[in-house]
Image (cartoon, rainbow, N blue to C red):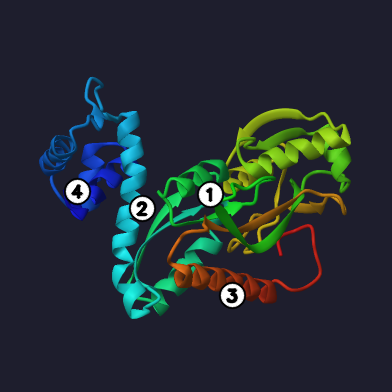
Amino acid sequence: MSIRMLRTLIAIDDHKTFSAAADAVFVTHAAVSQQMRALEENWGVQIFDRTRRTPELTPVGRALVARAREVVRGYDQILPSVTGETGVSGEVALGALPTTLTTLVPQVISLLMARHPDVHVHLNPGLTTAMISQLERGALDVALITRPETLPPDLEFMEIAEEPVQLLASLETQSDDPLELLSSHSFIRFNRDAVVGHMIETWLQKKGIRVNETMELDSLEAISSMVHANLGVAMAPRRCVRVRNPLALKRLSLGPDAPVRRLGLAHRRDNPRSRILSELHSLCLRVIESASAVNAGPDRTTPE
């Protein structure tokens, strides 16, 4: 057994197939198969169920992957723990919400890599619930998520911004009353599997508002485009870092009791890479502060 084999095993779990794992660790498909056969022979256990078209991890295999992640993480930190180096280098598996991929995330990664050229970021888009699961099993080092009502006790959350939910409507609509627009127009729903989608649904039920739902999407760009085409109204968070050249839409406040998305970085409490986590948090705050300064001014219904 070697650390290289453990990295390959982890890559299979992350990428789901031997071929994808081979690309991730820069070896051939045959080499991946040979390494996994060697692990099974050395340990005397069946790691993969090969009766399926695509081999899948057995329950024992999944347990071994979890322990392998701990071993590899510890191995990677041997030298930094002895020399006192804080480790703003190496590979970082970063999860991020789809709504942040065209605004906050690119700017943060750009700043991070400019300041620390030895950092290599592997970006993994996903929804909050799925990313929390990936954090718990060690598939992600850190994730930009919406804080859910409850957070697993082994995870820590570093808040970076609050994003109130607002109503989006076409400029062609006659009313500026969000409740009237919700009751009189088709509703384009934010994916209910997302934490913010669940928050929106809870708010609608609390208000006793019944909407005429016509579609459910998880891309804020797609939702905005549908609203811009006057296909309905929508509720979505007001992003802390706004897109360049945003569509001309009405962006209406839902009042003081509007749902608020708490955006932040989550990571395992036992994550040894404290400095890079702190650096990412600091850069997120820096990008948001810069965006706030640029967008300072009176609120308007058309794009800021």
Taking the image as shown, residue 15 lies to the left or right of residue 32, namely right
Which x, y percent locates residue 216?
63, 33
Q: Which mark sits nearer the N-terminus, 1 or 3?
A: 1
| Front residue of this view, candidates 102 and 75 | 75
Identify the element where label 3 is drawn: helix
49 w.r.t. 167: above or below: above
In the rendered structure, find residue 98 and report the number of the disc placed on it: 1
Q: Residue at x 24, y 23 (%)?
A: 53
Discs 2, 4 touching: Cβ within 8 Å? no
Q: Is residue 278 above or below residue 233?
A: below
Question: x, y (%) of residue 90?
Answer: 32, 67
Picture residue at 58% right of the left edge, 72% below the top: 287
Q: Earlier in the sequence, mark 4 or mark 1?
A: 4
Q: Residue 197's x, y, as percent?
A: 67, 40
Q: Mark 1 and mark 4 in contact (Cβ < 8 Å)? A: no
Q: Which mark is residue 5?
A: 4
Mark 4 → mark 1, Cα distance in angstroms: 32 Å
Q: Are marks 2 and 3 in contact (CB under 8 Å)?
A: no
Q: Nearer the viewer, residue 303 or 112?
A: 112
Regarding residue 233, the answer to whether it shows in the image is no
Q: Amino acid at mark 3?
A: Arg
Mark identifier at residue 286: 3
Task: Please tell me how many numbered marks the rendered image carries.
Answer: 4
Kind of residue indicated by mark 4? Met
As drawn, the label of residue 70 is 2
